[in-house]
Amino acid sequence: MIKHLQDYYRCRAEQVEFIAPSFATDDSTYFRFKRAITCYGRCRDGTLTKSASSPLHDASADVSIGASRIYLPFDPSEIIDNFYYERYVSDWRRGNALSSLTEIYYWLRPLLPVSIRKHLQQIYLRDWEKIPFPQWPVDTSVDSFLEQLLLLCIRASGGAEVPFIWFWPNGAEACAIMTHDVETTVGRDFCSTMMDIDDCFGIKASFQVIPEERYHVDERLLSQIRNRGFEVVVHDLNHDGHLYKSRMQFLERAAKINIYGREFKSKGFRAGVLYRKQLWYDALEFEYDMSVPNVAHLDPQRGGCCTVMPYFIGDIVELPVTTTQDYTLFNILGDYSTNLWEQQIQIIKGKHGLMSFIVHPDYVTTTRERQVFERLLERLAGLRDRERVWIATPGEVNRWWRQRAQLSLVEDGGSWSIEGEGKGHASVAYAREVDGKLAVTFETSGQSGKGEVSLRGAIND
């Protein structure tokens, strides 16, 4: 069984073995799997290409099944890691090495009003709609790829159901978190009002606070955030865009960031401008990170992790940013509706994933932007009240994902149960194939009967 498949589904299918080829070179290319899933890695067969926009070979034709073994023309773990670590991005090894123009921009940024900044950013991002991969506005390549691997397990075991531990506590259909990056003194001073707005809809959020240079961080504010049931997350060191400029500088800053984490009583971290270099995360002493976008077409560092689920990077739980930031929506796209957010909500909910939102207190102080934010909160409250979506804080999702990772399935007399801390909130789910797609039946903890869940977005055979 592939570790990534076990980690994602927390499943039991030891009787099935995946056989992947060995490769003599590190020559990774793009190809497809089941027509609609774009993959990046080494593949044994077909005409392969370095461009995601070229016609791509469908490697699913080269898969075979025999005697509880699945023979693949690629290494599925490599494919998934290439997404999680964004290795398909050509300059991923350099982190966010900045050009001279970008260096000048970040030096001037604190002095530039939003009206100037947004025009410069629009020029920089002007080609974003032409990027073929990841898929805008939400990319679920990892999720769809793992669905297909689970389908192969079912077929290799003669069509038997595969039990797994459901993604969210108490049988929730999906999950959503609200996060607030505090970038300026204006945003810091609006935090109390922001909490009032959130509380009107019964939603608790995290506040990402910059420790140095941008504004003075008052312990009274941090205590107020925590005492009201919200969370404090460390947001970079000084938000100057240089966190990952070099390994040496990162280690120096990471040491300071870790100290602030202890001082702020923070379990989570988010880098400024969503810069990231996952290979260096081992220097961060946090339980979770929120710096990796699902699709980064409209971010200075392009790429994206292509999943709507949390995942582990070493000992850190990554909570990917799966929706468009408010600043980007208002100032880059010029959109003052919730239409794009609604589109993203539907895609993520269809995969039973994590809807992760960033709304800055700095940019919703005026009536127009605030009304858009309140419509979003109203929509999230409706998802919670009518569509069984778990509205949580990032810390709660981190704790659940860690807890779920330690739960185990136990067979007893032909039925399955869950053992481990938190088992009372977990549900056993059963995956099977229906008309070439993955279908799931599960029992919700504390409820009687079974409910069938269609994993919408699964690829037809």
Image (spheres, helix red, strand yellow):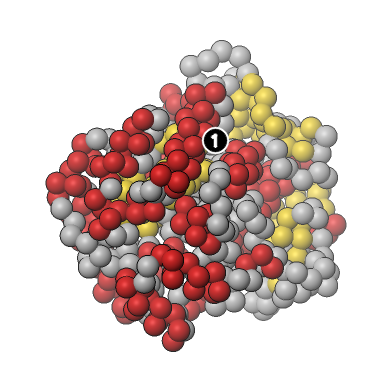
Tell me: 23 left or right of 4. Answer: right
Choose top left, top right, bottom left or bottom right for residue 16.
Answer: top right
Q: Which residue is mark 1?
A: 174
The answer to whether 353 is drawn above or below residue 134 in the figure is above
> Left of 175 or right of it: where is 150?
right
Callout count: 1
* Figure check: 169 above or below 355: above
Q: Is residue 75 left or right of residue 298?
A: right
Q: Residue furthest top?
A: 448
The image shows residue 310 at horizontal and vertical percentages of: 49, 48
Q: Position of residue 300 (x, y in %)?
A: 50, 70
Which residue occupies the foreground of this view, 178 or 402? 178
Q: Position of residue 167 (x, y in %)?
A: 53, 36
| Residue situated in front as seen by the camera: 213 or 367 | 367
247 relative to 356, above or below: below
Q: Nearer the viewer, residue 439 or 174?
A: 174
Residue at 83% from the left image edge and 45% from the top image edge: 461
